[in-house]
């Protein structure tokens, strides 16, 4: 039987326990702090863009959903560490499923955020991109070739890695962000550009997670790919 001394006696004490739990999660979990910062940013954005009531409800629900999922994930991980301090396959599965809940909530939040902000943000971005002239069809291919050659030269200069594995800068990140930038400048639309940008970010992240590149090498590669693509575009 539970010791009643460790149970909240009043609703105020229960509220304090809940607040302490949130504060502990924010203090100990880096992802929780990132989600809280993102929540504040989106709430300020909602005020700045003068969202309608329905759009604000969607955005607020998206933020709440992600924060709830991250708190749930933290609780599951803490409980699993308590009952299974040593490695166990089922403990790993429990943590993976809880992390999956955060991923599902995040995807849902992105969808709701899109419907909340699309009519405010995307027309502005589209108008900015329309100020550039239309690029010729061979522009993306030439950009990727130029970026690939520069990656090879830089890797030869730094003497580490090869064109497809390791070294400064990351060739995968350079090409991925070159393609994303080319899509942005080719008037394919804001939504396709955002999708390609997400794929480029996933490619860059995978290089770090696999231990093939450092964060600096990936950032250098992505920056090289984007900047050289813009330069090639301006030459056209």
Image: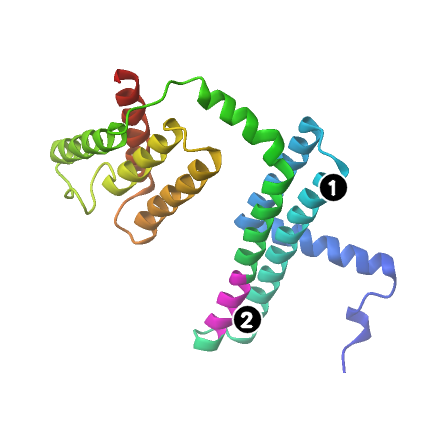
How far is the residue under mark 2 from the one under mark 1? Answer: 39 Å
Q: Which residue is mark 1?
A: 54
Q: Residue at 29% of width from left, 21% of height from top?
A: 233
Q: Residue furthest right?
A: 10
Q: What residue is drawn where x is 15% and y is 41%? A: 160
Report the magenta residues as a range: 91-100
In this view of the protein, can residue 224 be seen by the observer?
A: yes
From the viewer's side, name the closer residue of 17 and 216.
216
Give the colouring mode of the picture: rainbow
**Of 84 and 156, which appears nearest the observer?**
156
Locate the N terminus by quadrant.
Answer: bottom right
Task: Judge by depth and name the residue closer to the eye, 150 or 91.
Answer: 150
Q: Secondary structure at mark 2?
A: helix
Give the main secondary structure of the magenta stretch: helix
Residue 129: image location, x then y, percent? 45, 23
Q: Identify the residue position indicated by label 2 in the image.
A: 80
- Asked if the magenta segment contains residue 96, the reply would be yes
* Residue 35 drawn at (x, y percent): 59, 45
The crowding category of the residue bearing disc 2, from other C-alpha atoms within 10 Å (few below 14, some 14 to 19, many at least 20), is some
Q: Name the residue at 61% across, 33% down.
A: 119
Label 1 element class: helix
155 is within the stretch colored magenta: no
Rendered-image quadrant of the C terminus: top left
Q: Earlier in the sequence, mark 2 or mark 1?
A: 1
For the question of whether residue 219 can be seen, the reply is no
């Amino acid at each position: 039987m539970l010791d009643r001394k460790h149970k909240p006696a009043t609703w105020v004490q229960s509220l304090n326990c809940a607040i302490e739990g949130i504060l502990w999660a924010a203090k100990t979990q880096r992802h929780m702090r990132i989600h809280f910062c993102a929540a504040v940013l989106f709430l300020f954005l909602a005020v700045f863009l003068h969202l309608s009531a329905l759009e604000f409800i969607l955005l607020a629900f998206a933020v709440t959903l992600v924060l709830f999922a991250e708190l749930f994930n933290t609780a599951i991980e803490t409980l699993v560490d308590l009952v299974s301090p040593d490695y166990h396959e089922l403990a790993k599965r429990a943590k993976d499923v809880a992390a999956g809940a955060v991923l599902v909530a995040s995807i849902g939040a992105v969808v709701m955020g899109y419907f909340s902000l699309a009519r405010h943000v995307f027309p502005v971005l589209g108008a900015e991109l329309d100020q550039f002239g239309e690029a010729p069809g061979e522009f993306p291919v030439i950009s990727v070739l130029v970026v690939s050659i520069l990656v090879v030269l830089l890797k030869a200069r730094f003497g580490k890695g090869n064109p497809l594995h390791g070294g400064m800068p990351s060739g995968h990140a350079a090409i991925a962000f070159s393609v994303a930038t080319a899509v942005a400048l080719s008037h394919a639309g804001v939504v396709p550009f955002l999708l390609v940008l997400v794929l480029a970010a996933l490619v860059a992240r995978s290089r770090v997670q696999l231990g093939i590149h450092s964060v600096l090498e990936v950032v250098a590669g992505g920056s090289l790919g984007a900047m050289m693509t813009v330069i090639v575009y301006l030459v056209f």
